Image (cartoon, grey):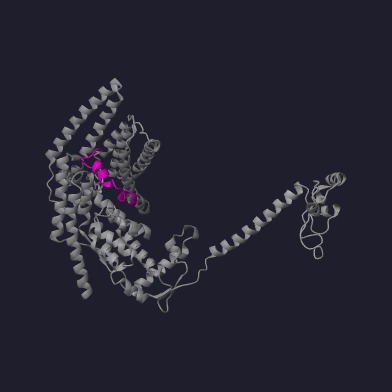
Amino acid sequence: QKDTQHQRKASLLHTIAIMEVLDSILERYPTGAARIQRLLFYAEHIGETIHSDNGETTTTPSKNQQVEGHIQKAYQAISATCKSEGNFVQYKNIFGSNYMDASMGNSNDNHASSSMAMNEDSTAAASGEKQHQPSPAVAAASRHNTSIEYDATWAEEQETLARQSREVLEHRLQVSQSQLHKESIRTAFLALAHQAAGTGDFVAAFQGFIRAKDYCTNRPQTTAVCLHIVSVSLAMNNLISANDFIHKLEHTLRSASAPSASASSTGGSGNNTNPVGTELDQILVQTAAALERMAAVKFPEALQSLIQVVQHEEVDSAFANAGSDGKHKLLYWVAPQDVSLYAAFLCLCHGSSSQMMALADHVSALEWVPRLKQALADFVHAKYQDCWNCVAVTLLPALSVDPLLGPHLDSLLKGIRRKILQQYWKAYSCVPLAVMAHDLGPSLVPSVDALRDDWVTLILEAQQSSSSSRSDDVSDLVNTRLDMATDTLHRDAPTDQSLVQAAKLHRLTKTVLNDSYSMVIRFACQEHDLVVTSGSDVQNPDGSWRPGSRQSRRGGGGDRMMDDVDDDDDDEMAAVGHVSHEDVSMIDAMNPEDLY
């Protein structure tokens, strides 16, 4: 009964917290396509109360009046945003579905009354449901039965005004093309693209920006247009185009920063270069790359870009340029608060301890999310229970309604939980599971049985993974053994075959090198007609090594070295003897095989 009351209390607190997220979204995103997207995701997922139950996330539907009230508030904000920006395309897609379905239903009823031979099932099948397939946003609006009245008159007026404005802009484009003025043509295409983006027609906006890029004459123009293309691609969820133009932007900015760097090294200033503007644009490109990687569910790659962004000193200026009042005025963007949230949360999931400590110690990297900053410090200092409570309890409402993290929140929380277990085990060579469960707390480890299952899964995954693809965390589990009888983890002595293979390889390398050195010496002696002997005359008169019969032909015996060079020094003559020309010619005339 206490557990049931605890779950109800946690669910209620989570519901209250998730309602407060709406005000935060409205504050962080005053305008733009990102505001509409996040409000739609919030309205669709607020009806599902996701709460943490002993480390496991459960989802239960919630139908209370407060939740429905916040859903209506979110749709009202969407409607107001669409009307204030003239975005009639998304307005019709979201709120016009019920109006279209009602009109289709009336026409189907009239058709059914005039045709008595058609039954009700065939009438339903002949309706426009199959021809009209609503988008996810439309389906969410229909499922919640929003009380927002569809303003068909406003939508038609805006569509007419947009058509007239587009005709004027197309006429200006034709005039510029007739005059063959490149800058005017680029400006005309940009005006058409911005007009289409303002009305919500992202496809036409994407095509307009693509055409404008063909008429860019310098790097700043190319950078600005490509940023717009990436922004529209992210709004359409066209990740392929976004990734393509992000790579083009990175190449453009690298080539733009190279002349400024060379000019600064020589003490001069490069022509047509703006190091500050280029640096700010690089922050925007790294942020766009992180958003694209997160949308593609490649969180480790996104983490690397996010860490560079949040640790940069000019990140606030860069995001100001991307806003509605900035230089670029990008259609789809992300708030700096969410960038810090993504960086800290993904660092807990996929970052190393050094990266966590660097973010936690940075002065301004995580100033927007102080709770996650403290969670990173708690993880590094082995305060795993406090870290887990911060992520899986306190911040769970905001994470569950985030369009980039929400769909994958269960797997990400599971990764953090496993990472905590592995980090805890690194400090021990033998620990009972009961002690581990007590140290980590009930919120992270519900029971010893659940902990046992987790460790069995971790050990099996570590053993099944190949040695070439093992990470550092997984390699630590290779020698871990779980005693099922006593529920105790043991760390065995390292028996990794890679160590044995490395020792064999070292011995083989040493042998090959010694043989190679010996062969070099032998070839040098053969080249200079030298015979080298070693050892005692009594024990080894012929030496430990000699090249065949050459020593006997030279009268060798004892430790000495012969050379074909005459020398008058008495000491050298004791070791080097003179070889006559007859002996040399006789040696040269012999069969080479007899020399070995």
Q: Is residue 85 magenta?
A: no
Residue 63 position by quadrant: bottom left
Q: Nearer the viewer, residue 269 or 215?
A: 269
Give the answer, above or below, for where 580 lies relative to 501: above
Give the answer, above or below, for where 479 lies relative to 79: below
Total of numbered circles in the picture?
A: 0
Image location of residue 281, percent across then percent down: 31, 41
Q: Nearer the viewer, residue 569 or 406?
A: 569
Q: Nearer the viewer, residue 85 or 255?
A: 255
Image location of residue 19, percent across then percent down: 17, 58
Image location of residue 4, percent across then percent down: 21, 72
Q: Residue at x 19, y 46 (%)?
A: 94
Residue 301 in sight in this render: yes
Q: Residue furthest right?
A: 582
Residue 282 position by quadrant: top left
Image location of residue 505, percent across then percent down: 59, 60
Residue 408 in sight in this render: no
Q: Which residues are magenta?
A: 307-327
Residue 535 position by quadrant: bottom right
Residue 105 is left or right of residue 52, and the answer is left
Q: Residue furthest bottom?
A: 486
Which quadrant is home to the N terminus? bottom left
Q: Residue furthest top?
A: 179
Residue 500 is left or right of residue 102, and the answer is right
